[in-house]
């Protein structure tokens, strides 16, 4: 299940949502709220995330991703030159090699592949006992970790918990070199795509905006089985008690405002939309955060209906409490994101979100 990105402020907001009255905006529909900005002054681009596409402002920048491919994590980090990836891989190899020197089963091994990737197999451990079927178990498992540089991106595949997956990791490494946005049957991370047939997959993509340094977005999708997920509003809210909440609000000068809290259908998927703002006193002044979430719980064992979540977060700090209460900056603030701009970016993204 996707974990909601909430902190203490959000927990307090749930308990004391009456701190400030809700501020109604245009009512969102399946097509979103009313457009308030000229698209010619705010050019958009279409990005591929997971098995979906959506429109974002032209200054949207890929800021990292984690793909989960049938139990193999693939961490992708931008802005890496090849020598830097090689140094990091060598540093970790020395650590792995040193801790495996006394391994009774097998020393750690390193394999340098033709395409420039490197694979480490290590922490070999023998498992013995009896299986659930009553048959004896006597086998050796090991961890696998791999590094690959491609197109100024660092790829790290596997970790200490990735057991006996070298062949699968090699297949993923081969698909990295074929990475592109036109790949069929692909899982995308904004800067490219990996060929991967659907099944047991998770996608987490971080995005920031070059011209809006305090604005961030995150796209998440995950296939799952078992019991159906609940909407965010249906989950148990294990926050502060009312007494603790009141004390914390007084101390932190906490303020809260709800802009939207409603069901919203996107691409025929009935999700839940929540947009809130909060302000609390911090060491640097008064921190205000505006958080927008659209969440679709998905359906278990349905590859075409994964759990989906889109976040858009904006934050800023002022020396004094906001003049007009918590929310977006005052008009005289420079280099800030206005309410209309934030809502347009949000609505454009949701209105354009479609499976590819």
Image (cartoon, rainbow, N blue to C red):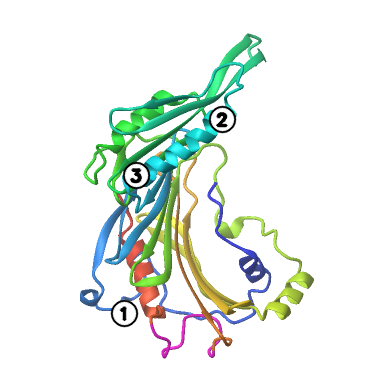
The answer to whether residue 347 is seen in the rendering is yes
Element type where label 2 sits in the image: helix
Q: Position of residue 76 (x, y in %)?
A: 39, 46
Mark 3 or mark 2, earlier in chain? 3
Residue, x 39% and y 63% (percent of image)? Answer: 208
Mark 2 or mark 1, earlier in chain? 1
Q: Position of residue 337 (x, y in %)?
A: 40, 78
Q: CA distance from mark 2 to mark 1?
A: 60 Å
Q: Is residue 300 inside the magenta stretch?
A: no
Query: Which residue bears the numbered disc 2?
Result: 98
Front in this rendered view, residue 262 or 206: 206
How many marks the image carries: the answer is: 3
Segment tinted magenta in the rendering: 323-334
Whether tag 3 and tag 1 are in contact, CB under 8 A, the answer is no
Q: CA distance from mark 3 to mark 2?
A: 23 Å
Magenta segment main secondary structure: loop
Residue, x 46% and y 41% (percent of image)? Answer: 223
Q: Is residue 327 inside the magenta stretch?
A: yes
Query: Which residue bears the numbered disc 3?
Result: 83
Residue, x 38% and y 81% (percent of image)? Answer: 335
Query: Which residue bears the numbered disc 1?
Result: 36
Element type where label 3 sits in the image: helix
Task: Rate crowding at label 3 as few (under 14), some (14 to 19) or many (20 or more) other CA atoms within 10 Å.
Answer: few
In the image, taking residue 91 as reference, residue 33 lies left or right, namely: left
Task: Rate crowding at label 1 as few (under 14), some (14 to 19) or many (20 or more) other CA atoms within 10 Å.
Answer: few
Mark 3 or mark 1, earlier in chain? 1
């Amino acid at each position: 299940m996707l974990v909601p990105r909430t902190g203490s402020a959000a927990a307090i907001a749930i308990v004391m949502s009456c701190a400030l009255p809700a501020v109604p905006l245009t009512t969102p529909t399946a097509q979103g709220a009313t457009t308030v900005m000229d698209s010619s002054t705010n050019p958009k681009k279409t990005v591929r995330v997971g098995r979906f596409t959506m429109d974002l402002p032209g200054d949207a920048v890929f800021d990292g991703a984690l793909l989960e491919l049938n139990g193999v994590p693939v961490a992708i980090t931008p802005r890496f030159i090849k020598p830097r990836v090689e140094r990091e891989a060598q540093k970790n190899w020395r650590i792995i090699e040193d801790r495996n020197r006394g391994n009774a089963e097998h020393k750690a091994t390193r394999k340098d592949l033709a395409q420039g990737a490197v694979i480490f197999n290590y922490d070999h451990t023998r498992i013995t006992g009896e299986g659930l079927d009553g048959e004896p178990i006597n086998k050796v498992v090991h961890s696998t970790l791999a590094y690959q540089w491609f197109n100024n991106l660092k790829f790290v595949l596997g970790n200490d918990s990735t057991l006996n997956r070298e062949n699968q990791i090699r297949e993923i490494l081969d698909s990295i070199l074929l990475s592109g946005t036109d790949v069929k049957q692909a899982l995308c991370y904004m800067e490219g795509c990996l060929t991967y047939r659907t099944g047991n997959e998770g996608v987490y993509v971080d995005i920031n905006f070059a011209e809006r340094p305090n604005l961030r977005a995150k796209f998440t999708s995950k296939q799952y089985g078992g019991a159906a997920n609940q909407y965010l509003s249906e989950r148990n809210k294990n926050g502060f008690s009312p007494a603790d909440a009141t004390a914390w609000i007084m101390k932190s000068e906490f303020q809260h405002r709800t802009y939207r809290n409603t069901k919203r259908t996107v691409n025929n998927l009935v999700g839940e939309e929540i947009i809130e703002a909060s302000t609390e006193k911090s060491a640097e002044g008064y921190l205000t955060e505006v958080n927008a979430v659209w969440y679709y719980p998905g359906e278990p064992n349905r590859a075409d209906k994964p759990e989906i979540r889109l976040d858009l977060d904006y934050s800023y700090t002022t020396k004094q409490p906001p003049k007009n209460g918590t929310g977006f900056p005052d008009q005289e603030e420079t280099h800030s994101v206005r309410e209309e701009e934030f809502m347009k970016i949000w609505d454009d993204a949701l209105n354009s979100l479609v499976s590819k």
